[in-house]
């Protein structure tokens, strides 16, 4: 019932946070050609927040490692029904109306400052 960044959890054999972020973003948006912003810190933002108790699961702290991920111009989102109820692009001027949590607002401010520092980030070179 709220807007969050794409995300998820590491699989048992995964340890690289950046690669996990890319996998999760690709799964949740259906955009295969995503890449990490070449000039953004990795991670861009770290957030620790409390998750309230639910059912048999007790309250606990949750750690979000957030990365600045880019998509090609004109990329179309294809929502994976098993991943999210809705997925869409938002413009910077639309964010205030979304009532986002303070950690996500902080991360978006960092992202906006990096993106504003140059017109665009280059698309990645193909790796051999």
Image (cartoon, grey):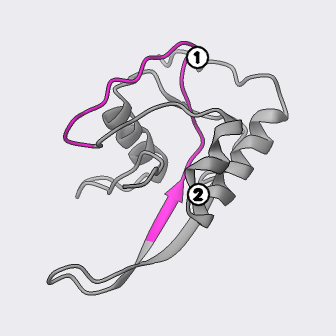
Q: Is residue 109 left or right of residue 61?
A: right
Q: Quadrant of the N terminus?
A: bottom left
Q: Is residue 38 above or below residue 54?
A: above
- On residue 104, the disc is 2
Q: Quadrant of residue 19?
A: top left
- Most common SS among magenta residues: loop
Outermost front residue: 97
Q: Nearer the viewer, residue 25 or 96?
A: 96
Q: Nearer the viewer, residue 40 or 72?
A: 72
Q: Nearer the viewer, residue 33 or 57?
A: 57
Q: Is residue 77 magenta?
A: yes
Q: Is residue 98 left or right of residue 25?
A: right
Which residue shows up at 40% across the image and 23% down it?
Answer: 77
Q: Position of residue 5 (x, y in %)?
A: 48, 48
Q: Quadrant of residue 88?
A: top left
Q: Is residue 98 above or below residue 46?
A: above
- Dot 2: few (<14), some (14–19), or many (≥20) neighbours within 10 Å? some
Q: Quadrant of residue 120?
A: top right
Q: Position of residue 23 (x, y in %)?
A: 36, 39
Magenta-colored span: 63-83
Q: Is residue 7 above or below residue 36?
A: below
Secondary element at image label 2: helix
Q: Is residue 108 magenta?
A: no
Q: Is residue 74 above or below residue 14?
A: above
- Dot 1: few (<14), some (14–19), or many (≥20) neighbours within 10 Å? few
Which is in the foreground here, disc 1 or disc 2?
Answer: 2
Marks 1 and 2 sit apart, C-alpha to C-alpha, by 29 Å
Which residue shows up at 31% across the image and 35% down it?
Answer: 27
To which residue does mark 1 refer?
Answer: 125
Which residue shows up at 74% across the image and 42% down it?
Answer: 112
């Amino acid at each position: 019932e709220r807007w969050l960044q794409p995300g998820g959890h590491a699989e048992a054999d995964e340890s690289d946070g950046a690669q996990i972020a890319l996998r999760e973003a690709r799964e949740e948006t259906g955009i295969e050609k995503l890449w990490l912003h070449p000039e953004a810190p990795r991670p861009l933002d770290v957030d620790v927040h409390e998750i309230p108790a639910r059912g048999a699961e007790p309250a606990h702290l949750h750690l979000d490692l957030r990365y600045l991920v880019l998509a090609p111009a004109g990329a179309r989102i294809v929502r994976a029904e098993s991943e999210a109820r809705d997925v869409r692009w938002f413009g910077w001027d639309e964010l205030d109306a979304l009532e986002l949590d303070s950690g996500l607002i902080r991360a978006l401010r960092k992202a906006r400052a990096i993106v504003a520092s140059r017109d665009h980030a280059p698309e990645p070179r193909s790796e051999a």
